[in-house]
Amino acid sequence: MTTGYVLAIDQGTTGTKVIVFDHEGGIRGQAYSEFTQHYPQPGWVEHDAEEIWRVSIRLVEEALMKAKVKAGELRAIGITNQRETAVMWERSTGEAVARAIVWQDRRTASTCDELKRNNLEELFREKTGLVIDAYFSGTKIKWLLDNVKNLRERAALGEIAFGTIDSWLVWKLTGGAAHVTDYSNASRTLLYNIKTLCWDDELLQILDVPRTILPEVKPSSFIYGHTDPEIFFGASIPVAGIAGDQQAALFGQGCYHAGTAKNTYGTGSFILLNTGTQAVQSRAGLLTTIAWGIADEPVEYALEGSVFITGAGVQWLRDGLGIIKNAAETEALAQSLKSNDGVYFVPALVGLGAPHWDAYARALLIGMTRGTTRAHVARAALESMCYQTRDVVGAMERDSGIRLTELRVDGGAVNNQFLMQFQSDILGVPLAVPSITETTSLGAAYLAGLAVGFWKSREELEVKWKVSRRYEPRIVETERERLYSRWLRAVERARGWALES
């Protein structure tokens, strides 16, 4: 029997989770903590990268203690992360020079508009597989260079490093020895050519980003460096897996073959369809992204639909409106109603993502009457997750020509049975919930373990995936289409709201 363990750091948008996995993929110990969200102006979202590091290393210690595992017993460390969030730090001190700009942040929407007016959208789409949107890192990097005092000058002198959160954590874990990222994270920057697998000089020039600040891009399963024993509890452990959170979830769900798909319900929801070694160009508002690269194998691609606000909408009901005390309440509230009574919530709190891509859309609650209660609002928030998923799945089917026969699902919201049943109903396909729902962390662990031989192959990993619960559609086609058509009407009313008239 193979001895040892793999540790995964899952650095998400609202919290960080660290899990210790054994060779069977079982969870031996885990720890979780939220961290501070900063909203300095409307539409701005920031994180303190130093706080993220402190929280992460504290949780590593806590997870190891709960697992009764010593740091030296780890065979590898995998990292998965919120992807498009941009961090810059001093190479000499390893200290962040400003708060990280989070993927949800919309401050660069006007920059994106200018790029579109200059007819550059097709160029960026052809090279990166992405649309021009404030969601991605590229315009965030430009904003930091242009707005943080002396930063552009210091970057030109080679004093500054940029990275997404994975790069930041690897730098910290290795004591500054490794400035790297993987294919999946690089493909979310608007700067990386997903066909040539290089930082693209033309795009760097357009966004005025110096190559000197960028990390080296490596496969997703690769030994990037070793932990600094002075930082990592006296142990030198290979940091051997990196993947953006959604690609990691796709890997953890065992979606290794073209045509398999998953949806992760987190702060946002992200639906990915594996398209194999073929980069399918989307014409329906989806993203073409790198799924992963394993050692020296050809990279594999995915179609992705990014829904910005799903779980964050429920969080807003809790923290912003105060109409629920915790997310779990929404299930009973939704089930207390026989129908939605015509109440719809379009959660465009930070604009709309795929397939609409409207940075100026804003949230809308419509269909209310004097009989509307907080149960209607809670139900509308849950149903909005499902409608947005259908928006994306429909676009995927049009782009790929593949009709989904099953959707594998993960994330905290899979515990909400109302949500899962309605999702199956509105899609008209079965949903499969895996026995291990921590698939994002598991994917990072698998990638790291493969790099060091802890697991030998994807075939070995594939047999570990098992279904815990399956949901089948229950409503008739006419009702499904009636509900969905009203959703589309609501979306139209939310679009373009923040534009000056």
Image (cartoon, rainbow, N blue to C red):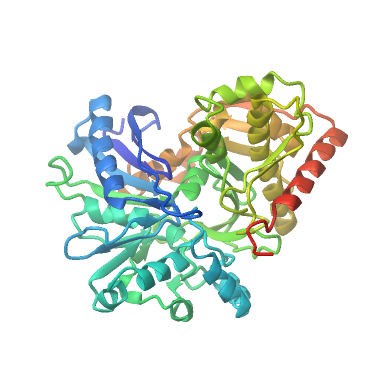
Left or right placement of residue 102 versus residue 123 in this view = left
The residue located at (84%, 31%) in the rendering is 476
- Name the one closer to the observer, 134 or 189: 134
Most extreme residue toward the right, as rendered? Answer: 478
Total numbered labels placed on residues in the image = 0
Residue 400 place in picture, x, y as percent:
70, 57
The residue located at (31%, 39%) in the rendering is 7
The residue located at (51%, 42%) in the rendering is 267
Residue 211 place in picture, x, y as percent:
35, 76
Q: Quadrant of residue 364?
A: top right
The answer, for residue 290, to whether it is visible in the render is yes
Left or right placement of residue 419 versus residue 479 in this view = left
Task: Tell me the quarter of the image containing the C terminus.
Answer: bottom right
Residue 231 place in picture, x, y as percent:
16, 46
Work out whether 153 lies above or below 427: below
Left or right placement of residue 147 versus residue 337 in this view = left
Residue 496 place in picture, x, y as percent:
68, 59
